[in-house]
Amino acid sequence: MRDGVQQEDASLVALRGVSKRHGLVQVLHEIDLDLRAGEIVAVLGPVGAGKSTLFRAINGVERIDSGSISVEGRKLLPRRRWLPGRHRPAPGPGELFAYRTVLQNVTLGQAWLRRLTQAEATRRAQGLLEQVGAGDCAASYPWELTNGQRQLVSIARALAANPRLLLLDEPCGPGAPTVLRGLAADGMAALLATSDPAFARAAADRILFMAGGRIIERATPEEFFTTPRTARARDFLAGGASGGAQR
């Protein structure tokens, strides 16, 4: 084990030495990260710390300059634009189809399950909405939902593809931590990028604190929120979340 990094053979997702530069700005610096099945890890840090770039790299839509990203021991190829279907991340709220109902959005998320009839797909979609606590939103359109409801619907749509991994960039909503813990209990892994300490504390099994394109602390929520080791983390938790922003 290196600097708190778990052994790679136990990891669903493993990053080793991942770096990325945008022009003259080094956005990611030698990132090591491991995520095991059934685990919720929050990448916490100020806006601009590099969290979204990191998630785009894991999802294959941002090419890295050096290092490696592996899913279940298979390296993500530099030109691959997405992870295998069962690893696809939850889409952001803006990716829901605006002129389709919530139920239709989730039903479309399982279109690859060709063996399902339309009636079966609709029943399954309703069940997924119930599972995440958004069952009463089925007949609504995305623009009629709160941010928290849209996030739950996005999770339900991602679940339609039977994933083992969820990537959530700035999740929100008071019900989301409970939903994620239920999914983790069933063996699903979730990686969260957030600038919200309260959400990270409520949802995560581990905290990775990121600032200036680096992961500078790795700890349990109890350790991080009671005895942060670095001045940047202490400043962030005290409200001074400038903490080395990188664009």
Image: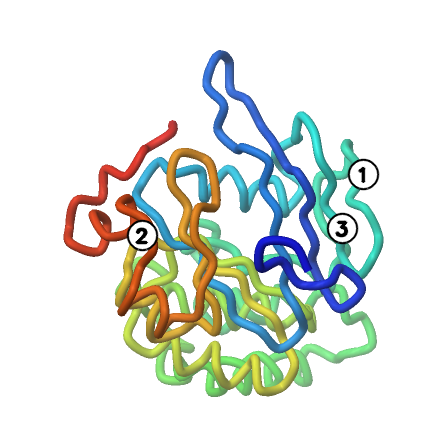
Q: Quadrant of the C terminus?
A: top left
In front: 234, or 162?
A: 234
In front: 210, or 163?
A: 210
Residue shown at 48% from the left, 81% from the top = 181
Mark number for residue 77? Answer: 1
Crowding near pointer 1: few (<14 within 10 Å), some, many (20+)? some
Say if residue 138 shows up in the picture: yes
Horizontal and vertical percent position of residue 43: 45, 55
- Give the Cα separation between the discs numbered 1 and 2: 29 Å
Q: Is residue 55 above or below residue 85?
A: above
Q: Which residue is mark 3?
A: 70
Kindly state the secondary structure of the residue where label 2 is placed. Answer: loop
Q: Which residue is mark 2?
A: 195
- Give the Cα separation between the discs numbered 3 and 1: 9 Å
Say if residue 98 shows up in the picture: no
Which quadrant holds residue 11? Answer: bottom right
Horizontal and vertical percent position of residue 91: 52, 55
* Three-letter code, disc 3: Ser
